[in-house]
Amino acid sequence: MTHIHNSEKKTLKLAQLRPAPSFVVADKVGVTYPVRGNIAQGIDTQSTPRMIRDVRGRLRGVRAISDVSFTLNEGNRLAIVGENGSGKTTLLQVLAGILKPEVGTLRVRGRITSLININLGTQIEATGHRNITLRGLAAGYTHDEIEAKREEIAEFSELGEFLSMPIETYSSGMRMRLVFSIATAFTPEILVLDEWLSAGDVSFKEKATRRMIEFVEKAGILILASHSRKLILDNCEICLWLEQGVVRAMGPVLEIVNAYEADQRAKKTNPDAPATLLRGAN
Amino acid sequence: MADAVYVSIGGRSDPLVGLKDLFQGLSKVQLWLAFAADEVQQRYRRSRLGLAWIVVSYVIFVAAISIMFGGFSQKGASEFTAHIAVNYAFFSFLIANITDGCAVFRTSKNWVGSMPLPHSIYVLKSVARSLFVLGITMIVGIGVLLATGHMMTPISFMALPAFLIILLNAVLLQTYLGYLTARFRDFEHLMLSLTRVLFFVTPILWVRTEMPEGSLRRIIADVNPLTHALEILSAPLLGHAADPLSWKVISIITVVNIAMMLIASYLAHRRLPYWL
């Protein structure tokens, strides 16, 4: 009996040393936001196919993303590009497990840390130090593990004395530093980041990029939504282009980012051209 | 934890999601205790008396009511004071669980939208916070009991199982009231209007057994679930066994609450982030 118990313990230890490889598999994932109450019809009565209306023409839902499929394995670094409102943040929220997909299947293995909305997931009346504790506990670490990381977080965030002040007194850049430092200190296996990383100054952005490279070298999975060409090219190898909630293209990062930016320029010179025409020209 | 595969299938819910969520939440005890401690501190931040306000407001209320309404009861002054002290402490706890329960997810939007934590974390945090307030008031309450000659007897210990079953109900109730409010925002306003009335229709200012059988007040007290919750909690502390009817009513309510919590979780769990 004891013998079996010991061998079980050993295999458990081995599993901890060499965790099963992480992955993220999205299969035809779709999310629809419900709309409640009557929303007055605007001047623009032409609606996109993303708007779901009932028989009386009232808005009932907005299809944020539909039919999104992809597979990410260890060491993959995915960038998500797209215009405002194309569904980037919604997709990140689904991948992070915050929103449950309405249709499709999502399978994820690995400890996820997500930094999607900088204003969420903190207690703004509490001090920086207290927030380190709360976020650490929320991510599933013990008080001892958090204390072991506290100094490193303080150092990386460069917030010094400010960590003893309530974070409602922080600037958005300072908050970003704190939250990014906490999130990456605990070495997640899957890191999901929204574009607010750009709130940092140049030196912090460089530092953050170095840390993300380190993280990906440890065979993590990085998913990053951004409008910054530099940030994307520095950190990612593949790119997913979202348009109107659906995947327009996915492939090597440089190719997709170039195509996306060419499309943006084309739209700028001919803003009235319908999307279908642009798609044909591409 | 790292080896577990998170699978989310569109449009499908686990029938026991409420139960699983509760157990996941219970295991994160450090987190909800930290949240609860923060909220209690936050409420009294920058006030000079701080936590002592809980005691002060309780003492003011019990003293004022004992003086004003003591004469209306057939009980003696000290007996009536003990009745108020115990019943009011528990009543505040029950009401706090109704009002906080409605707000439990609405006020946790900040965290629900940023991390996939079990929803029961927010409920347990909220119950822990009201429990803390009850603990502080009951220290004074027990002082009042001892001062009015209510010594601990073997029967007093019946308050313990009563307290545990009420605690379970608090968790269940807060969960489904929270989901209901998240979906139907009018619900919270309705409950707030009702709790104001509950104070008068629950035997705190008056004593249920003093009302004649069949009188309006007696009937109202009998159909009010709070009456029975207070009876099983307070009676043992006041030195007599609780009415067996109250235990039966609370047992039925517990079963109903378990069902309500499971149904509400099944319907609302996956949709909560969209509603907030």
Image (spheres, coloured by chain):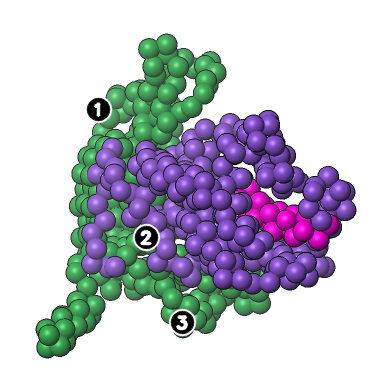
Specify whether B201 is left or right of A147.
Answer: right
- Pinpoint residue A4: horizontal percent, then vertical percent: 11, 84
Tell me the kind of residue under disc 1.
Gly
Q: Colour of chain A?
A: green
Q: Which mark is residue A144?
A: 3
Which residue is rendered at x = 52% and y = 33% of the image?
A: B184
- Give the mark nearer the N terminus: 3 vs 1: 3
**Number of other residues with Cα within 10 Å of mark 3, as a class: few under 14, some 14 to 19, many 20 or more:** few
- Pinpoint residue B186: horizontal percent, then vertical percent: 58, 31
Name the quarter where the C terminus of chain A is drawn.
top left
Mark 3 or mark 1, whichever is nearer to me: 3
Check disc 1 and report its element: helix, strand or loop: helix
Specify whether A83 is left or right of B61.
Answer: left
Chain on which label 3 sits: A
Q: Which chain is purple?
A: B
Displayed quadrant of residue B42: bottom right
Question: Are dots 3 and 1 on a single chain?
Answer: yes
CA distance for labels 3 and 2: 23 Å
Is residue A282 covered in magenta? no
* Nearer to me, A152 or B239: B239
Residue bearing the label numbered 2:
B23
